[in-house]
Amino acid sequence: MLKEIEQNVIGILTEISRTRDDDNLLIAEYWRRQLGGSDITRHLPADALLEEFTNKRLTRPDTITRCRRKIQEYNPHLRGTQYEKRHNKTASYKKEIKEWY
């Protein structure tokens, strides 16, 4: 299951470069593909989408974004323009927390 999620996220990051910096777009594209593509999702009412989500037939958003972060950690060519900014900010937060304790 996780390998399948990873392959799908890699495919999306490769095909749609905007998803490298936009988790919402990544999740939306992942779910669109998971539901069968643009024809189905273009006419899917919001309540049907929510039902799919609540019945756990859609991959959890945090799983998709966690997978994206791991992929970008090991694949620099799939990183977006915001990767270094996020990575540096996280490192500085960790340093500050260590200094407090």
Image (tube, rainbow, N blue to C red):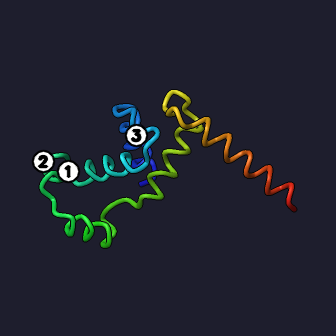
Q: Amino acid at mark 2?
A: Asp
Q: Amino acid at mark 3?
A: Thr
Q: Identify residue for label 3.
A: 19
Q: Are marks 2 and 3 in contact (CB under 8 Å)?
A: no
Q: Please give the name of the residue rendered at 30% of the width and 65% of the height, measured from the top-left corner.
A: 57
Query: Mark 3 or 1 closer to N-term?
Result: 3
Label 2 secondary element: helix
Q: Are marks 3 and 1 in contact (CB under 8 Å)?
A: no
| Structural distance between the alpha carbons of marks 1 and 2 | 8 Å
In the rendering, which numbered label is found on residue 39?
Answer: 2
Q: Nearer the viewer, mark 2 or mark 3?
A: 3
Q: Identify residue for label 1.
A: 36
Q: Nearer the viewer, mark 1 or mark 2?
A: 2
Q: Which quadrant would residue 15 be assigned to in this image?
A: top left
| Structural distance between the alpha carbons of marks 2 and 3 | 21 Å
Relative to 64, say whether 72 is above or below: above
The 10 Å Cα crowd at callout 2, few under 14, some 14 to 19, many 20 or more, is few
Q: Amino acid at mark 1?
A: Gly
**Percent x, y of residue 89:** 67, 44
Q: Please give the name of the residue rendered at 48% of the width and 51% of the height, measured from the top-left corner.
A: 65
Label 1 secondary element: loop
Is 65 on the left or on the right of 88, as rendered? left
**Percent x, y of residue 26:** 38, 46
Q: Are marks 1 and 2 in contact (CB under 8 Å)?
A: yes
**Percent x, y of residue 76:** 56, 29
